[in-house]
Amino acid sequence: MEFEPVIGIEIHVEFKTKSKMFSSAPVTFGASPNSETVPFDLAMPGCMPVVNKEAVVYGIRVCEAMHMKIARTLYFDRKNYFYPDLPKGFQITQQFDPIGRDGYIEIQIDHKPVRIRVNNAHLEEDTAKQIHLADISLLNFNRAGTPLIEIVSEPDMHSGEEAMKYVEAIREIVTYLGVSDGKMENGSLRCDINVSLREKGSTKLGTKTECKNLNTIQNIRAAVDYEVKRQSEILLSGGKVEQETRRYDEAEKKTVLMRKKTNAIDYKYFREPNIVPIDLDEGFIYDAIHSMNKLPNAYREDLTKLGLDDYEIEELLKDRDFVTYYEDCITLGVKNPTTLWNFLMVDILGYLNKNSLSLKDLKFTKENLASLVNLLSDGKINSKQAKEVLSVMLEKGSDPLSVVKEKGMEQISDTGAIETLVEGVLADNAPTIADWQRGKDHALGYLVGQVMKRSKGKANPSLAKELILKKIGPCGAKKGQ
């Protein structure tokens, strides 16, 4: 019997607004416990909620990025349950009328687009954070009330890879929009993954399990793949999958039981009486959408047109700061986009990582980097010299033209001057030329090296190679043949 996995994902994204969803308390990470609260966050009597305008703008942008129908009126509801991390005894959410409906995300699987439908996206407030010790549990209310958007997919995914890439795509969107830092390790992006199996060809859904506490993108794929394997073994042995909440144990590389689900919880939802319906002006929605940051797929299109390959594009897109820095350099008139990529993603990134620095710590300007790329592209310096110049720029913030002049590096690209050097090298290296004519191809490198030596590293090596070949012919062919 063959089974098909069916996967749906609920993602909670914390917005990095200045204040909380319904109060004026600041939104921060890492502050002293319970230091970033106001009476509303602690559910003091008489406190009233006020909707965060910035969070609504962020919600509209996320929905637009996921091709959703955006609500024209905001409604909020109460989700009632009693739990230590919920001081009011209810959470303010959007159960019945979410801010966005019926959208989709496209991911790439084996270089083919796969569309994952998104059922809805709704705004709500986060809960307090619980810290469980040996004999007591502590509560930190700094997180209580932090604005969230919950993104609920349709059960359209069928593998761990699809689940991983879907979450990765959502994280890309929210980080590029600037609405969240998307850090799973800090809880800024959290997901619950529902996995079930059904007979291949069937449309009836099987019993699902929910997997929580996934703190890395890689763990999402690992957890789904393990759960598919576990459920398959149960069904093939004649057993029944039970509805459970499970977590992924990274050390054991498997999902483990947290609790059984015996029946659905009745949250007794009803309209939040302290927030009246809010009509969203068309101009407000238009402004929110048309002031959005550029999205990853738009960058992909532009970078492809520049001639970067898939690997180069995806490496660049891992960090929005790098792709915007790269794009800014391109607009300054960089002549070789691939050379720019190599400097930025190999030499500069390596330097920053080694010294625990970021792009904003660079001592030189984007104009300086563009100038260096063009000096190399125009043949005024060679690649070895370019790396030497970049090294000085990284340490001192110098202008590349100044470094080239100070070090007397300017490359010789005059054909006549290089031809004179070539003729001298060939006249002094008859045995090497004979080796070349006998098919020993390493001889060419030696001859080019001699030209570089005589020019003190200033000759254009490509032009030197071209002129040498013109005079000695192809490898293995005696002159005149």
Image (tube, grey):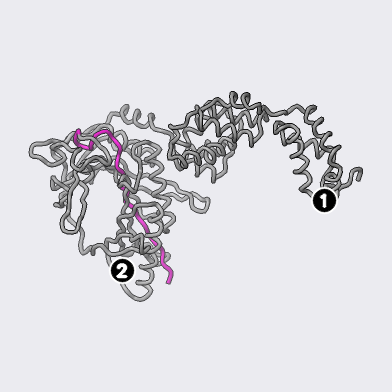
Tell us which disc is closer to us: 1 or 2. Answer: 1
- The residue closer to the viewer here, 239 or 393, is 393
> Type of residue at label 2?
Val
Name which quarter of the figure residue 289 lies in: top left
In the image, residue 49 sits, relative to residue 368, either above or below, namely below
Q: What's the residue at 38%, 49% (across, down)?
A: 167
**Residue contact at pointers 1 and 2, CB within 8 angstroms:** no
Q: Is residue 204 visible?
A: no
Q: Is residue 38 visible?
A: yes
In the image, residue 211 sits, relative to residue 376, either above or below, namely below
Is 228 contained in the magenta span? no
- The residue closer to the viewer here, 296 or 360, is 360
Query: Is residue 449 toward the left or the right of residue 331 in the image?
Result: right
Residue 462: mark: none
Q: Which residues are magenta?
A: 1-24
Query: Is residue 67 toward the left or the right of residue 271 in the image?
Result: right
Badge 2 crowding class, 10 Å Cα cut-off, few under 14, some 14 to 19, many 20 or more, is some
Badge 1 crowding class, 10 Å Cα cut-off, few under 14, some 14 to 19, many 20 or more, is some
Q: Residue furthest right?
A: 480
Q: What's the residue at 19%, 57% (across, down)?
A: 265
> Type of residue at label 1?
Gly
Query: Is residue 156 toward the left or the right of residue 385 in the image?
Result: left
Query: If the image is split into quadrants, where does the N terminus sit?
Result: bottom left
Name which quarter of the figure residue 33 lies in: top left
- The residue closer to the viewer here, 474 or 99, is 474
Residue 241: mark: 2
Q: Which residue is mark 1?
A: 439
